[in-house]
Image (cartoon, rainbow, N blue to C red):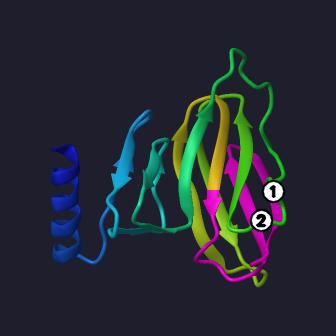
Amino acid sequence: MKTLILTAFLIMTASASSQSVLTLGAGTSMGVLTGANLCANVINGSGLLYGGGTICGGLVSVEPITSNELPTSFEMFQNYPNPFNPVTKIQYQLPKANYVSIKLFDQLGKETAILFEGEQQAGYYQVTVEGRNLASGIYYCRLNAADYQKVIKMSLIK
């Protein structure tokens, strides 16, 4: 029943407006039916998208990584694998709750995707980036949180 309601909501939203917002709360998931398409530039939340349809856009998921300890510093680690095709993961840590912005840029500095933007609690996180709809090349991922900023270089090879 939830799938039917969600499908109807997405169809009604798509027909009513060219833009819509989907927010998944912590621990939630959303399925995409076979043959369906879900395209988004930004998906806020720490839920997981799955299914047999076409999932396009930059972000596949932002997942908290379970740990008994809180980090003592801000850090973003190099994506793995790198080079990647078509999926890569980026881990980062926050020592305290903050507004977090993670964006993807092409070689010319043009913003390609907003991977995540919003408040997050202290902890360890992992962003899974889907590159199917991106051209081969060099990309830069920038994380901003509080006074911390870091950029990593990523290579997409198709």
Q: In this view, does 102 lie to the left or right of 9?
A: right
Report the magenta residues as a range: 129-158
Q: Quadrant of residue 59?
A: bottom right
Asked whether residue 80 is drawn in magenta, I would say no
Q: Is mark 1 on a helix, strand or loop?
A: loop
Instruction: Say which mark, if any, is on residue 84.
Output: 2
Q: In this view, does 61 lie above or below 72?
A: below
Question: Which residue carries the number 1 mark?
Answer: 81
Residue sitting nearer the eye, 22 or 8: 8
- Left or right: 65, with 18 as reference point: right
Horizontal side of residue 100 vs 34, given as left or right:
right
Rendering coords of residue 53 (x, y %): 39, 65
Say whether marks 2 and 1 touch (CB < 8 Å). Answer: yes
* Number of marks drawn: 2
The secondary structure type at the circle numbered 2 is loop
Which amino acid, mark 2?
Answer: Phe
